Image: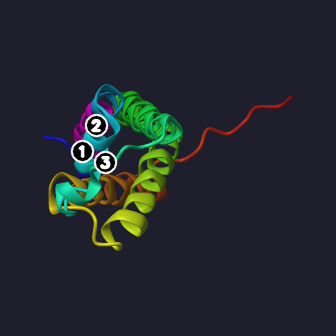
Amino acid sequence: MLNSHSLALKVSAVLWVIWGLVHLLAGIVTMSVDTTSAFQGIAAAVEPSLLVADYHPAVGAILNQHGWNLAWAGAVTIVGAVFIWRKSGTSIWVTGLVGGLFDIGYFVFVDLGGFGTFFPGTSMTFVSASAIVLSFWVGLTALRPQQAGPV
């Protein structure tokens, strides 16, 4: 049977893979569709007809940059999850920073603005927060940094 720290890291890793796959897919979709469709997907709580417009190409470029950022953050958390599963203290912190800061931005600007929906938006915030709490708990209580040897 797995001890509680090992189990917490494995659950955290699975949560990060879920979060990462959702964000990787969201990034690919955002870059693959037209600007109006991308905005309708991101601001899902807004009446879709209110987001129909003839957007300047610069708006589409900025939205594609957002899609790129979603995709790379998703990919980083998936890779980080593999190392969290293997009990890497560094990966706990790096993955938590990447996924956590991404979700703080979503929560503040989209959720609190009333533009997002619970699924997948807000639910992914709960997924990342749970992964952070579980892995940081282990990182702070059980994993000790390697002592550097003499130089």
Q: Which mark is residue 66?
A: none
- The label nearer to you, 3 versus 1, is 3
Mark 2, Cα crowd under 10 Å, few <14 / some 14-19 / many 20+, is: many
Residue occupying the far front of the picture: 54
Q: Secondary structure at mark 3?
A: helix
Mark 3, Cα crowd under 10 Å, few <14 / some 14-19 / many 20+, is: some
Quadrant where the C terminus is found in the figure = top right
Q: What amino acid is found at the position of numbered circle 1 in the picture?
A: Leu
Q: Are marks 2 and 3 in contact (CB under 8 Å)?
A: no
Q: Earlier in the sequence, mark 3 or mark 1?
A: 1
Q: Residue at x 39, y 29 (%)?
A: 75
Q: Earlier in the sequence, mark 2 or mark 3?
A: 2
On the rendered structure, is 90 left or right of 29?
right
Q: Nearer the viewer, residue 150 or 112?
A: 112
Residue linked to disc 1: 15
Confirm whether the magenta stretch covers residue 23.
Answer: yes
- The label nearer to you, 2 versus 3, is 3
Q: Quadrant of residue 32 in the image?
A: top left
On the rendered structure, is 116 left or right of 86?
left
Confirm whether the magenta stretch covers residue 70.
Answer: no
Q: Are marks 3 and 1 in contact (CB under 8 Å)?
A: no
Quadrant where the N terminus is found in the figure = top left
Residue linked to disc 3: 39
How many marks do you count on the picture? 3
Residue linked to disc 2: 26
Q: Main secondary structure of the magenta part?
A: helix
Q: What amino acid is found at the position of numbered circle 2 in the picture?
A: Ala
Kindly report the distance in space between the C-alpha atoms of the residues bearing marks 3 and 1: 26 Å
- The vertical placement of 91 against 48, above or below, is above
Q: Residue at x 28, y 46 (%)?
A: 12
Give the extent of the magenta segment. 8-26
- The vertical placement of 64 against 121, above or below, is above
